[in-house]
Amino acid sequence: MTDRELDAAGIAEPSLRAAYTHCRRLNARHGRTYFLATRLLPAARRPAVHALYGFARRADDIVDDLGDTATTAERSAALGALQAQLDRALGGGDTEEPVVRALAHTAAVYGIDRRHFADFLASMRSDLVVTDYPTYDDLCAYTHGSAAVIGLQMLPVLGTVVPREEAAPCAAALGVAFQLTNFLRDVGEDLDRGRVYLPADLLAAHGVDRELLSWSRVTGLGDRRITSALMAAADLTRGVYRRAAPGLAMLDPVSRPCIRTAFVLYGEILDAIRDDGWAVLHRRAAVSRRRRAVVAADGLVRLASARVRARVASGAQGCAPSPAPGPDGGKAPVPLGGSARKGTA
């Protein structure tokens, strides 16, 4: 499967193929929902998504690996080295770091704004020193770099049927919705890292503070105030999904099944948290393997339908389908106009 994806994307150079393969393995190992959805993309676009995920995962591991005994200063230095390698690679230089090499190639092929990567790394650096967020506005400043820009990085790869700037707010909102979902699911694990991502003012409105969260984490006991705060956080997150939803219809039709699958499965993590009694301080809630398979199967049906419609449309217009972007820096086609609207997930 990996060779077919790389061949479809026109990636021929052996070391570059190895870099993309490394990123794909990271995605398959750590991003269960994300990887499943990625497999619904056309083969030529999957390596780019793996590269984006692989780089984000590498940076996140530098900051958050609980099994790593590195000091804050050492983690900061590692992030700085990663930034330096990325800057060099984006400027046309070489690097031995596979995730950076694949990312730089993807950025060149799809014309991804390099500022998105700088904003992402800035948020990663803040994780080394910031341990909580007083308000939701404060959290949004963080999630712009840690999540919204991920949606913006993805947009050129996915393609749109409207001008890209029109789809950008929905793509950014979807990235934030996914991350807020992760924050809610991982409250306990983040607390172990010394961080609380739920806004302090939201918690305080329900009588919750870090001390109460820590007590619940240590004792394994619940508290109705915590449950109330978690429910409010879930409601806030669902509101961000609603803002993102119109973007699904703005995507290239062949990308929609992928993003819709991620949209549905990530949203259902909120349902799983609710159904597990809001016990996120004690265990991680997850969508069942069977449910993931059902949603993925629906995505395959939608993908097949989209491909048929695309072939029919191409035949009616007397033209061949657009080729996949190759390694020469050509950007993915972003068809404009059209009436079908779709979003990202």
Image (cartoon, rainbow, N blue to C red):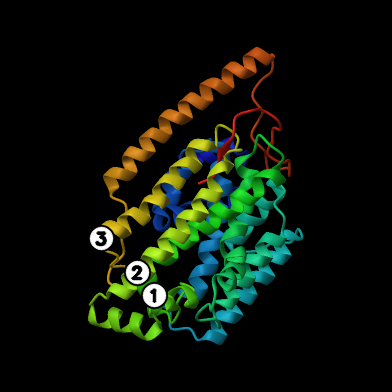
Residue 235 x %, y %: 43, 59
Query: Which circle, 3 or 2, is nearer the viewer?
Result: 2
Quarter where residue 295 is shown: top left
Q: CA distance from mark 3 to mark 2?
A: 14 Å
Residue drawn where x is 62% and y is 61% of the image: 100
**Mark 3, residue position:** 276
**Mark 2, residue position:** 228
The answer to whether residue 97 is visible is yes
Residue drawn where x is 37% and y is 86% of the image: 211
Q: CA distance from mark 3 to mark 1?
A: 20 Å
Query: Which circle, 3 or 1, is nearer the viewer?
Result: 1
Q: Earlier in the sequence, mark 2 or mark 1?
A: 1
**Mark 1, residue position:** 206
The answer to whether residue 66 is visible is no
Task: Sort mark 3 into few (<14), some (14-19) or many (20+) by Cα contacts within 10 Å.
Answer: some
Residue drawn where x is 51% and y is 63% of the image: 57
Q: Earlier in the sequence, mark 3 or mark 2?
A: 2
Q: Earlier in the sequence, mark 3 or mark 1?
A: 1
Of helix, strand and loop, which one carries label 1? loop
Of helix, strand and loop, which one carries label 2? helix
Of helix, strand and loop, which one carries label 3? loop
Relative side of 186 to 97, left or right: left
User: Is residue 170 or residue 238 the one in the foreground?
Assistant: 238
Asked whether disc 3 touches disc 1, contact meaning CB atoms under 8 Å apart, the reply is no
Tell me the amino acid under the disc marked 1: His
Residue 246 x %, y %: 57, 42
Task: Sort mark 2 into few (<14), some (14-19) or many (20+) by Cα contacts within 10 Å.
Answer: some
Tell me the amino acid under the disc marked 2: Ser
